[in-house]
Image (tube, rainbow, N blue to C red):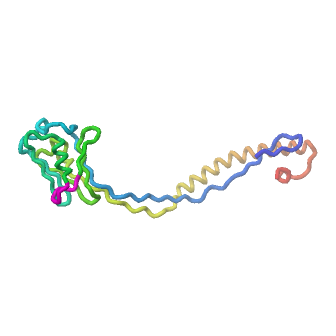
């Protein structure tokens, strides 16, 4: 804020605000997420299983919560047939959906947030579910963390306030010295604080 006195250079009044109160932070709760398993062999719905090395009679098993969906190739099936079988909702089938992602990988997703998914069978690796990429767990929900004071935030705030205040103090001191000199030269009496306010 600038204040001008008749015939004198403008004076600058500095206002320093105190550092903010101690910040608190909390981690947000997250919802439970279903198990998701992604194969690592790129295919399309029209890819014949025989080109992937799955012969007639070759089987793949997808399990979740004690239920298993079994797919057995007839020798002329495609990836589309496999996905359709996995997506069939029967009481004894694994409650899992099957899709292809943008890269053509098979993506298996549990239909709930409780079940683990397993992909088994000699030919599971041929569709991207080899050993080490056959079991997929759901992500449990997390509770929010209790609020905790962040002492490092508080101390860094006061440090930055002090360093920014230091610059203001030196600028104010320089301006007040110039202002005091101007006032004395003009013959005005009184203190600088009374004249500014």
Q: Which residues are magenta?
A: 89-96
| Residue 3 picture location, percent across and down | 81, 46
| Left or right: where 161 falls relative to 24 | right
| Residue 174 picture location, percent across and down | 77, 43
* Image quadrant in which you'd find residue 167: top right
- Answer whether residue 30 is magenta in the image: no
| Residue 20 picture location, percent across and down | 61, 56
Q: Nearer the viewer, residue 61 or 145?
A: 61
| Number of numbered callouts drawn | 0
Residue furthest toward the right? 187
| Left or right: where 16 falls relative to 139 | right
- Answer whether residue 90 is magenta in the image: yes
Instruction: Name which residue lies at 24% across and 58% down.
Output: 115
Q: Nearer the viewer, residue 177 or 30?
A: 30
| Left or right: where 28 falls relative to 46 | right
Instruction: Name which residue lies at 24% across and 51% down.
Output: 97
Residue furthest toward the top? 51
């Amino acid at each position: 804020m600038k204040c001008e006195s008749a015939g004198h250079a403008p004076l600058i009044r500095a206002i320093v605000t105190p550092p903010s109160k101690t910040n608190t932070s909390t981690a947000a709760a997250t919802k439970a997420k279903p198990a998701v398993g992604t194969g690592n062999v790129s295919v399309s719905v029209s890819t014949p299983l025989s080109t992937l090395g799955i012969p007639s009679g070759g089987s793949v098993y997808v399990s979740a919560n004690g239920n298993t969906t079994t797919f057995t190739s007839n020798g002329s099936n495609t990836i589309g047939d496999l996905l359709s079988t996995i997506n069939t909702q029967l009481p004894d089938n694994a409650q899992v959906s099957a899709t292809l992602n943008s890269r053509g990988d098979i993506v298996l997703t549990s239909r709930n947030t409780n079940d683990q998914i397993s992909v088994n069978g000699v030919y599971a690796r041929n569709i991207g579910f080899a050993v080490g990429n056959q079991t997929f767990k759901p992500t449990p929900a997390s509770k929010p963390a209790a609020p905790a004071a962040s002492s490092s935030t508080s101390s860094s705030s006061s440090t930055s306030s002090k360093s920014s205040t230091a610059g203001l103090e030196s600028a104010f001191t320089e301006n007040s010295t110039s202002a005091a000199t101007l006032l004395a030269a003009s013959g005005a009496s009184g203190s600088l604080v009374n004249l500014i306010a």
